[in-house]
Amino acid sequence: MTSIVPDPNKLIMICTSDIAGQVRGKAIPKSALAARREIGVGWTPTNVFITSFGPIAPSPWGALGDLILRPDLTTQVDLPAGQHGFSESFVLGDILELDGQRWACCLRGQLRHALAQLATEFGLAVSASFEHEFHYSGVTGQPGLGYSLRSFRRQGEFGDRLIKALAAAGLEPDTFMPEYGPGQYEVTVKHQPALRAADEAVILRELTRATARAMGARASFSPIRDPDAVGNGVHVHFSLQTLTGDPATYDPASEHGMAASAGAFAAGVLKYMPDMLALTASAVTSYLRLTPHRWSAAFNNLGKQDREAGLRICPVFDLRPEQIASQYHFEYRAADAAASPYLVLAALINAGLAGLREQLPPPAPTSADLSNWTTTELEQAGIERLPRSLAQALDRLAASSALTDWFGATFMEAFLRHKRCELELMQSLTPEAQCARYNDAY
Ligand code: GLU
Ligand code: MG
C-alpha cells in the first residue's frame, strides 16, 4: 500500500474575488499557511482596476499603497491530483488595511458589513444559494436537446467529476442538468449562510473551470454566448432567518406568504434594482441577456413562479406548514457571473436593509408579460424596465446617493472607473465580438 505524504512545499493560493469577477491572489507553500493566518500576504490597491481584458483602468492610487490579503481558512479548497484528474489548492480571503480595518474595495468585506448591519439593526440573517448556468465546450451542442438525456449523456463524465470535486471541497451538490441552450448546463448546491454561500459560488465557478480543463475543454460562465443565444444566468436564491436560525421569510396569514420583514426586504430589492443593476450584471453583454422572452429578467417586478421576473417567489413542495416556512424563499434573477458573488449578495442585502429601514409595504406579484405593458401601466404598478446597457446602468449607479451610502464613496469611484474603462474597451466592437471577448474572459 502506498501512503500519500503531503508535500509541505506544495503551493496554495490565497485569493480574492474582485470587481472584474476574477479570482486573483498570491501563492505560498502550504506549510506557511498557518503562519499567514493573521498577517496574510501583501496586496496592491491598484489591482482592483485590472480589467478582465488586460488594461488597467485609471487608478487614483497608481503604484502607491499596501494592503493585506488575509486567508479565511474555513474556505480552504485542497483537492489532491489523482482523485480528480487535477489538483487545486486555494483559500479565499479578506483584504484589509494595514491597521486591520476592512478595505473599502474588498467585496467579501462589503458583504460581511451588510450582514452585520442586518443582524444589528433587525436581528436577521440571510441564507442563500447561487444557481449557475454555463457552457461546456466538451460537447457538440445541438438545438432542440434542451433538458434532454441525450444532452446529459454527451457531457460524458464531466458532470460526475464536477459533482465529486464540489463534494470533496465541502460543498453540498444539489442538481446538475442539461439546460436549454446547446452545450449549456446548470449546477446547483444547497443553501448556506450568506457569506459561505458567496464563498461557495466562487469555489464552484473555479472547480467547474478546473474540471473542464482537466478534460481538455472549457467551461464559460459568460453572460451570453452570442446575441441570439439564451443567457447564462446566476440566480440567487435567498431567505431570511432569525439570528438563532429560525425561518423568518414566511407568514401563512399574509396574502402571498411573505412575512412583514420579508415583504419590506423584497420591496427594497425591487426599489433599488435599477440603481444597483451594474453591480449584479456588470458586463457589457449582460444587457443582451436581460431582455424580455429570454427567461432572464427585464423589469424590477416581483413574480410568483414567473421565470421572467426580476425577483421571484419560488415554489414550495410540501404542504406541512413547518416545511413551507423553511422552503419559502426569493430568487433574484438579474445577476450573472461577470459579477463577484460577494458584490451581488452585498447589493441584495443592502437593498433589503434599505427596504426594512424605510418600512416599505410588501410588493404585489405580477403575473403577465410586462413587455406588453404600456409605460403608464408600468408606472401605475411602480415597475420600470431595467437599464438596457451597461452605460445606462452605470449612470443609474453613479446618480444613486443610496448606493454611495451603502458602499462608500471609495468603492463607488473604483467600481465606476473600472467599469467605464471596460465599456471603452468594448465600445468599438460588434455585439458578436463583445460576446466572444466575454466568453474568453469568463
Ligand atoms: N437562461 C436563463 C437566464 O439567462 C434562465 C433559465 C432558467 O433556468 O429559468 O437567466
Ligand atoms: Mg436554469
Image (cartoon, rainbow, N blue to C red):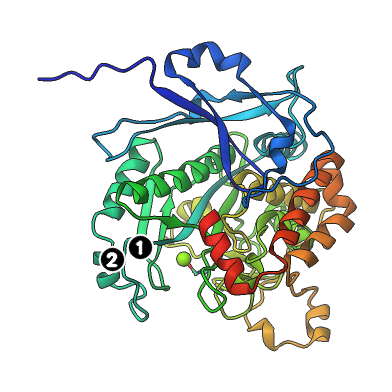
Relative to residue 315, is residue 97 drawn left or right?
Answer: right
Q: Is residue 30 visible?
A: yes
Relative to residue 403, is residue 176 drawn left or right?
Answer: left
For residue 245, above or below residue 396 = above
For residue 55, above or below residue 99 = below
Q: Is residue 123 visible?
A: no
Residue 287 is situated, as x and y percent measured from the top left of the image, at 66, 69
Relative to residue 117, is residue 4 drawn left or right?
Answer: left
Helix or strand or loop: what does disc 2 sit on?
Answer: helix
Q: Which mark is residue 98?
A: none
Quadrant position of residue 94: top right
Which residue is painted at 45% across and 53% down in the image?
323
Q: Quadrant of the N terminus?
A: top left
Quadrant position of residue 258: bottom right
* Nearer the observer, 425 or 228: 425
* Nearer the observer, 37 or 238: 37
Residue 250 is situated, as x and y percent measured from the top left of the image, at 59, 55
Can you tell me whether the CB of the residue at mark 1 lies under 8 Å from the nearest atom of ligand 2? yes
| Amino acid beneath label 2 | Phe
Quadrant position of residue 165: top left
* Nearer the observer, 299 or 368: 299
Residue 280 is situated, as x and y percent measured from the top left of the image, at 66, 56
Helix or strand or loop: what does disc 1 sit on?
Answer: strand
Check the image and name the residue furthest to the top: 35
Pointers 2 and 1 in contact (C-beta within 8 Å)? yes
Q: Which residue is mark 1?
A: 177
Q: Which mark is residue 152?
A: 2
| Amino acid beneath label 1 | Met
The total number of labels drawn is: 2
